[in-house]
Image (spheres, rainbow, N blue to C red):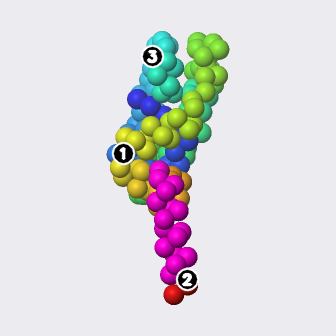
Amino acid sequence: MRQWIGIPPKIMCRQHLIGEYREHFAIKGLLKKQVRLDGYFRNNCIEPLSLQLRFDLLKEEMKNRNYKTKDLVFNTELFDYLNDKKHFKLDEKETFNLLMQKCSVCRKNALFQNLFNPVSVLSTKTKKISQESDIC
Ligand SMILES: [Zn+2]
C-alpha cells in the first residue's frame, strides 16, 4: 500500500494506476477504524493530507482510460486521531525513483514523456549523432 506521490497518473501502467486507486479505499477503511499507521509513515507510504487530491487525480486518469470509478471522500476529521502525523509528507523524488526502479512499463512511459532520463550519456550520444546527421 503506497501512494505514488510525484508520479503523474498519466504515465502509470494499468497495474500501478488501478492499484494505487484501490489502495485509497483501503486507506480510508483504516482511517475510519483509527488504525495506527506508524508502519506506513516509517516506510514512506502515505501522506494523509494529500489523499483526497491524489485520489481525484487518479480517478480522473481512470476515467480518461474508461476504467470504472467510484467516489471517495476523505473528510478532514478522519485524520484528527493521527495528530501531528497527519502532516506527514512523502519525498516525491524518492517515490518517483522507486517506481522507476520497480516497473519497466511506468519507466517506459516516463521516458516517453521526457520525465525520466536514466542515462545522460546516452542522450549526449544521441545529440552527437543528430548533430552529425545535420552536417550530412
Ligand atoms: Zn507500473
Q: How many marks?
A: 3
Cα separation, mark 1 vs mark 2, equals 35 Å
User: Label 1: few (<14), some or many (≥20) within 10 Å?
Assistant: some
Residue 116, compared with residue 75, is above or below; it is: below
Residue 60 visible, this orientation: no
Residue beneath the point at 40% across and 41% down: 101
Instruction: Point out which mark residue 39 bears.
Output: 3
The reply to whether callout 3 and callout 1 are in contact (CB within 8 Å) is no
**Nearer to the camera, 4 or 125:** 125
Instruction: Point out which mark residue 103 bears.
Output: 1
Q: Which residue is mark 2?
A: 134
Q: Amino acid at mark 3?
A: Gly
User: Label 2: few (<14), some or many (≥20) within 10 Å?
Assistant: few
On the picture, is 105 further left or further right than 42? left
The overriding secondary structure of the stretch rendered in magenta is helix
x then y, percent, for residue 35: 46, 13
Cα separation, mark 3 vs mark 1, equals 23 Å
Looking at the rendered image, the disc whose residue lies closer to the viewer, 1 or 2, is: 2
Bounds of the magenta segment: 118-134
x then y, percent, for residue 22: 40, 37
Instruction: Point out which mark residue 15 bears.
Output: none
Quadrant showing the N terminus? top left
Residue beneath the point at 49% across and 56% down: 121
Q: Amino acid at mark 1?
A: Cys
Q: Amino acid at mark 2?
A: Asp
Q: Is residue 130 magenta?
A: yes
Residue beneath the point at 53% across and 62% down: 124
